[in-house]
Amino acid sequence: MNSSSDREHLDHLAEDWAYLVEHSGPRVRGWAERHPVLAGCEGPLAVLERIAEQPDATLAALLAEDAAGCPLAGRVVLQTMLPKLRRMARRDPSAGIDDYLAQLWLVIRRYPLDRRPRRIAANLALDTLKAVRAERHQQLVPVAEPELERLLPPVLETADELTARRLIRAARRLGLIDRATGALLATVYAEGCSGAAAAERHHANPGAVRQRCHVAVRRMRAHAAELAEIA
């Protein structure tokens, strides 16, 4: 799938990456002290070059850093996987780049490095594709509005009382949600509109609004730490 929403996601990722390239040198040098494969790397661009030279060892180091609580490492993994994700999304008539990005974040966070230390990039791509397909075929279960309203507070608490709007903007920067979903979440959680009012404003039925919010909030909860860091 290729759409204006996909292009907007990619533009946000490009802006985010440019910022990280400029400001992440100290963090990368810290990785280099802990992982010999990253020796001499002064910033994210050098890490991408090292991935091309020694893919499994470098990706393993980044996944270990991500698992230890450094989402920047996961973001570098995402950056190196982005061309592959774009190709996958272009061939997919039912899912966009936002779907692939959201699933890749989860795959990175859950990757079993001890059991699968080889062909890491290929495994990440395949696991992401499987996850996108599984979500597509998952039966949509209606979510009651009172239940939905209880989903977002844990994200807010984890994020140290950040506002809903800042969380939503952060989720868009991470590629977890698209612009339309962000606007819908803002209507429900930032403005406090009821599901019925949100449905009317966004020209959707209340059931679809609940389901879209449920899927988006589930993704956000899975990345609460990253959202708190960049919001």
Image: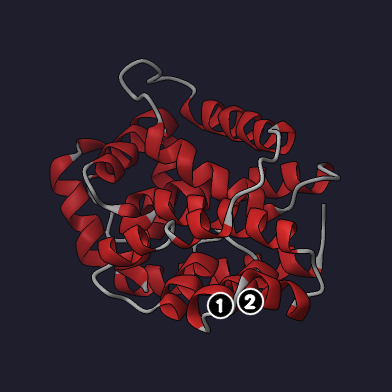
Q: What colour scheme has been applied to the protein in the rendered image?
A: secondary structure
Could you classify mark 1 by the number of other residues whose Cα lies within 10 Å: few (under 14), some (14-19), or many (20 or more)? many
Asked where in the image residue 98 lies, by quadrant, the reply is bottom right
Residue 179 vs 210, above or below: the answer is below
Residue 153, how many percent across, how many down?
A: 36, 63
Quadrant location, the C terminus? bottom left
96 or 87, nearer to the observer:
96
Q: Secondary structure at mark 2?
A: helix
- Residue wearing tag 2: 183
Classed neighbour count for the residue bearing mark 2: other residues with Cα under 10 Å, few (<14), some (14–19), many (≥20): some
Asked whether 41 or 193 is in front, the reply is 193
Q: Amino acid at mark 1?
A: Ala
Position of 149 compared to 25: left or right? right
Residue type at mark 2? Ala
Q: Are marks 1 and 2 in contact (CB under 8 Å)?
A: yes
Q: Residue at x 80, y 48 (%)?
A: 90
The residue most toward the left is 33
The picture places residue 6, in percent across and down from the top left corner, at 72, 63
**Which of 144 and 220 lies nearest the eye of the viewer?**
144
Residue to which mark 1 is pinned: 186
Residue 155 located left or right of residue 12: left
The residue positioned 46% from the left and 80% from the top of the image is: 165
